[in-house]
Amino acid sequence: MKRKRKLTQLICAVLYNCHITGFAEGTIYQGDLKSVCIPGLNCYSCPGAVFSCPLGSLQSALLSSKYRFPYYILGVLLLFGILLGRIICGFLCPFGLVQELLYRIPTKKLKKNVWTRRLSLLKYVILAVFVIGIPLVLLTPGFCKYICPAGTLEGGIPLLLKNESLRQLAGRLFQWKMLLLVLLLLSCVVIFRSFCRFLCPLGAFYGLFHRFSLFGMRIDEKKCNNCGACIRHCKMDVKKVGDAECIQCGECMESCSRCALSCGRK
């Protein structure tokens, strides 16, 4: 399962960012595929990106919601949520792969505890305030502009490296986002998927569908003896397999001695 999941994450990262010439030229792909949203977090402004980010598209749609309702992007997000839920976080998100690779760096790790569980609620605040509230009230894409580390890593840094004119325009806002990116990447070395757990509004949105998604983790209640081994094994802040914090990665299956866990259609 681990190898299949890592391979799926890698394939998605390559497919999402297969416009290789964009990295060499420092340009953004503007073809027809940019009208298509992918399920995971991947910056629209990444030179290699051939698809649109759902969070960026949602904020852009909310900016113009006074004139037209964002049927398309809301429909796409609802479809992703109902079909897959947080399977997207575990299998289809390139920034999730980056965080997991950083966590493999050998050092002391901070284990989950009552405080990490409380901090996991912060991403719902960010979803409400920065993704929905600020675009509607202040007419600016709050999350993309002030927070998104994927945008800084995938879009901001490569574009600045290739464009001197952009480097001259970079100011305090970019400095803030670079500082935030560095802090988040460092935290990922000692905290498993720290951005996903505490700050990612896309994961928060998909987590709302944990009871309704068609695919995800399944528990055979007849086999389960409620020993809690799966919860202890999981690095996320789950209280139960398949809840809103579960990224449906399936790694808990190896901890179940009674084979009560499986991943597939619910």
Image: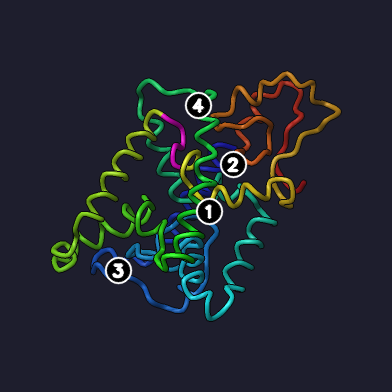
Determine contact: label 2, label 1, CB under 8 Å. Answer: no
The stretch in magenta equals: 191-195
Among numbered discs 4 and 3, the one appearing first in the sequence: 3
Residue 36 is situated, as x and y percent measured from the top left of the image, at: 52, 71
Q: Which residue is mark 2?
A: 247
Q: Which residue is mark 1?
A: 128
Q: Which residue is mark 3?
A: 21
Which residue is rendered at x = 79% and y = 25% of the image? 224
Color scheme of the displayed model: rainbow
Numbered tag placed on residue 239 in the rendering: none
Residue 71 is situated, as x and y percent measured from the top left of the image, at: 61, 73
Residue 206 is situated, as x and y percent measured from the top left of the image, at: 61, 51
In terms of image quadrants, where is residue 56? bottom left
Distance between the alpha carbons at the discs numbered 3 and 2 = 33 Å
* Amino acid at dot 1: Ala
Q: Choose mark 2 or mark 1, whichever is in front.
A: 1
Q: Choose mark 4 or mark 3, whichever is in front.
A: 4
Among numbered discs 4 and 1, the one appearing first in the sequence: 4
| Relative to 70, 20 lies left or right | left
Q: Which residue is mark 4?
A: 115
* Amino acid at dot 4: Trp
Q: Choose mark 2 or mark 4, whichever is in front.
A: 4
* Amino acid at dot 3: Thr
